[in-house]
Each structure stands twice: as structure tokens, then as C-alpha cells.
Image (cartoon, grey):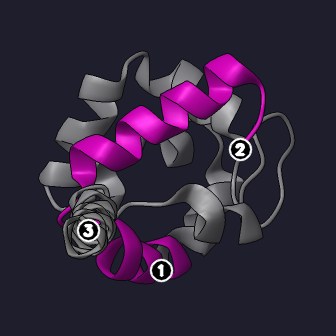
Amino acid sequence: MKKALIIAAVASIGMMGVATEASAFNVKKCKACHAVAKNKVGPAWKDVAAAYGSADALAAVFKGGFKVGDRKMIQANGKWKGKAGLMTGQFKHLIKGHEDEAAKALFDAVAAGKI
């Protein structure tokens, strides 16, 4: 019986690791440059959400390679053009491969009012 409990405990810990790997995108690193309601190094996420309108629209831009010309925040406010290179690096490091998750996380954070 004791052996069965140990095996079950180890298996459940292993499954937790799988679940963590499956949802690898995490907004914690995004907080260094973004907030939901105010501009920081990057634009406020509420403004990004308003510019794109939906997580699907933002994910499509991410999936398209996040080209500077496709970024609605730069079109809406030219001050963000100078930050485009910085965000391109972060996109390649943090978002690429997690485009749908990243877009959904942004819209979820705006809906919740916090990151």
C-alpha cells in the first residue's frame, strides 16, 4: 500500500511538470515593460487591446512575424516606433511559438484589470 501511494505521488508530480510545460507562456516577464492601464517602456495593454480588437487579430500579427508595419500601436502613436527594435527582440525571445497564448494572456489581463 505504501509503495502504491509513493508511485501515485511521483506520477502526480510528473503530470504537474507536463502541465507546466504545456502552458509555457507566462506574462510575468512582460510586466517589466508593460502594465494593463498605463504606459511604461511599452504601451499599456488596454491600448494594445483597443488597437487590435481581439486576441485573434493580435495573434495573427504575431504569427505573421510581428512586422513593424503591421503593428497598430506604432500606427496609432509614432512614439512607439523607437521601441520597435526592443519589442522585436522580446517577441523572438518570449512570444514566438506562443502566439495564441500570448495574445489571449494580454486580453485576459485587460479584462481582469491586472497582469
Look at the image and say whether residue 38 sits in the magenta stretch.
no
Question: Taking 64 as reference, is 81 left or right?
Answer: right
Q: Which of marks 2 and 1 is nearer the N terminus?
A: 1
Q: Where is residue 48 in the image (x, y as percent from the top left)?
A: 57, 35
Q: Which amino acid does label 2 sit on?
A: Ile
Residue 47 in view: no
Q: Name the residue under label 3.
A: 21
Range of magenta residues: 86-115
Residue at the extreme front of the image, as rendered: 1
**How packed is label 3: few (under 14 Cα within 10 Å), some, or many (20 or more)?**
few
Quadrant of residue 45 within the rendered picture: top right
Q: In what element is the residue under mark 2?
A: loop
Q: In what element is the residue under mark 1?
A: helix
Marks 3 and 1, how far apart at CA: 28 Å
Residue 22 or 74: which is nearer the viewer? Answer: 22
Residue 113 or 85: which is nearer the viewer? Answer: 113
Question: Taking 110 as reference, is 11 left or right?
Answer: left
Q: Mark 1 points at which residue?
A: 85
Q: Mark 2 points at which residue?
A: 115
Q: What residue type is labelled 3?
A: Glu
The residue positioned 22% from the left and 76% from the top of the image is 3
Question: Taking 8 as reference, is 109 left or right?
Answer: right
